[in-house]
Image (cartoon, helix red, strand yellow):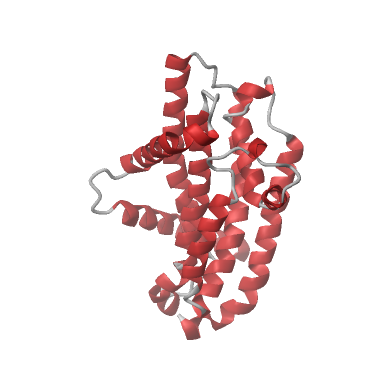
Amino acid sequence: MQTIKQWSKNRNIVHELIRRNVKTQYRNSILGVFWSVLNPLLNMIVMWVIFSQFFGQDDPLYPIYLLTGNILFQFLRSSTMSSLTSIVNNRGLITKVKIDNYLFPLSSTLSALVNFAFSFISLLIIMLCMQVFGGHSLFGYQMLGIILLLPAFLLFQYGISLFLSAIYVFCRDIKHLYTVFLTLWTYITPVFYKINRIDSNSIAYKILKLNPMYYFLTYFRDSVYNMCYLGGGMASWKMLGLLYLLGLISIAIGYLIYLPLKKKFVNYI
């Protein structure tokens, strides 16, 4: 019974934290939520103009390829960057109210999911335009694969968020280092380029295959972009199993680092 009460209390806390995070993000913003839809579209247009001649030749669906990569990686970036400082930024609550610290990175991760949902609208708009004006058949039941993907991706992000938020309490420089790492991570993830343009025997190809985001992005695209070329059918169940394994590994590592450090948080925040 105590466990059920605690779960209900934590659920309400997370809900309120998410509401606060979303309100804070759009406070004093003229465009508000509309910017979360417009921003991915503008970024896609800029990247399409710059990269289409180099990476999207002979691909009429290259805008969708770009947008799928951009919104999924932005989901990761937004989630982990906001989670990184979440415990320190809530020092007032931690020192005055008895609250589980892990709820702060969790609420930041789920807040990023809200933004991803708005960004996904921009993808649907582009898909609709290309279906109506380009004659492509883009909508199908394969898109249900996205629903199966999200829990695994949230687990993966939350594991990273636990690790980053715990380390940031003791070392504030991790924020600058992680920003640089995110830039590197962007370039070793096929956000705007295609893996078939890389020599399969090269070191770059082997590094790409070690990148977890490659597999998340591949499944996401298999559910949206690649279904036009897969001849129907859901994305690989084997790939989905790998994604959940990556999510569980990330959670395990995150908690292994977070748990021994959390007792010392009060002395450093």
Q: In this view, does 85 lie above or below 209?
A: below
Where is residue 103? Give x, y as percent. Answer: 51, 64
Can residue 11 be seen in this snapshot?
no
Q: In which quarter of the image is the C terminus?
A: bottom left
Q: In this view, does 227 lie above or below 201?
A: above
Seen at 52% across and 52% down, the residue is 76
Would you say 233 lies left or right of 114 here? right
**Quarter of the image holding residue 125?**
top left
Q: Looking at this view, name the residue that lies furthest to the bottom.
A: 267
Can residue 205 be seen in this snapshot?
yes
Where is residue 38? Give x, y as percent. Answer: 35, 38
Seen at 54% across and 21% down, the residue is 138
Where is residue 5? Give x, y as percent. Answer: 56, 62
Q: Quadrant of the N terminus?
A: bottom right
Where is residue 189? Give x, y as percent. Answer: 59, 48
Would you say 16 lies left or right of 200 here? left
**Which residue is nearer to you in this view: 217 or 147?**
217
Would you say 151 lies left or right of 29 here? right
Seen at 62% across and 49% down, the residue is 213
